[in-house]
Amino acid sequence: MMFLMAMLVVLIVGDAASTFLYHVPQHLWGKLHLRVHHDRNRSFWDHAVLSRDPQVLLDGFLGAFPYIAVAAVMWRVSPWGAVAGLLLGQVHVWWRHTTDLGWRTPGWLARLGRGLQIVLPEDHDGHHRNPDIEFGDFFRFYDAPARALIGRVRTANRRRRVVLRRLERFRALRSLRLSRSQQPAQ
């Protein structure tokens, strides 16, 4: 029982941490992930499995680090469960990039995966094609909260830019008035 609990905690909590502490921030403000993982000129299989490019490896490590941190905590509960969670997560990384090789998930496996809210290769392929959808490394139930968070942050950023532009105009007008009032009368 502790084995199963440790494995599931690594997958569920690791996915949440990876999604909200790395993946979403990279889509909002980062360049590394978007450049190496969403490059349309690059094979997704190459990116996830074969590449030895230091930037690709760094992106992979930063996405995996939350899982590793959770596994380190779960090690005390069940070392084998923690390792199984990491291994299952890695196999899933390889599997979800197989659409590039022509893989199509069989109907029975797609139904099972959908029922368990697991990201299928076709889902992840959709994320490669449109980086604004299908968030969550392992589980699909992180997609809606991730999109909502991205929407809120982007809206707040737009509002902040509008306020800053208005503030700049206000300062420019005030500066203009001050400079006019300090000019000698003619």
Image (tube, grey):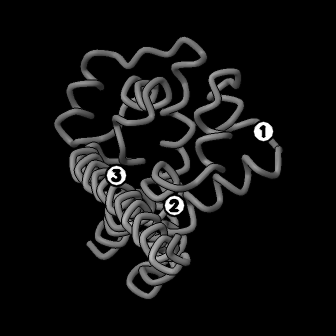
Residue located at (78% from left, 38% from top): 51
Q: CA distance from mark 1 to mark 2?
A: 20 Å
- The foreground one among 51 and 167 is 167
Secondary structure under tag 1 reads: loop
Which mark sits nearer the N-terminus, 3 or 2? 2
Q: Are marks 3 and 2 in contact (CB under 8 Å)?
A: no
- Expressed as whole percent of the image width and height from the top left, the position of residue 84 reads 47, 61
Q: Residues within 10 Å of mark 2 (few under 14, many from 20)?
A: many
Where residue 43 sits, quadrant-wise, is top right
Q: Is residue 57 above or below residue 83?
A: above
Q: CA distance from mark 3 to mark 2?
A: 38 Å
Q: Are marks 3 and 1 in contact (CB under 8 Å)?
A: no
- Expressed as whole percent of the image width and height from the top left, the position of residue 22 reads 49, 61
Q: Is residue 159 left or right of residue 38?
A: left
- The numbered mark at residue 158 is 3
- Expressed as whole percent of the image width and height from the top left, the position of residue 10 reads 40, 67
Q: Name the residue carrying label 2.
A: 86
Q: Amino acid at mark 1?
A: Ser
The furthest residue to the left = 115
Q: Name the residue carrying label 1.
A: 51
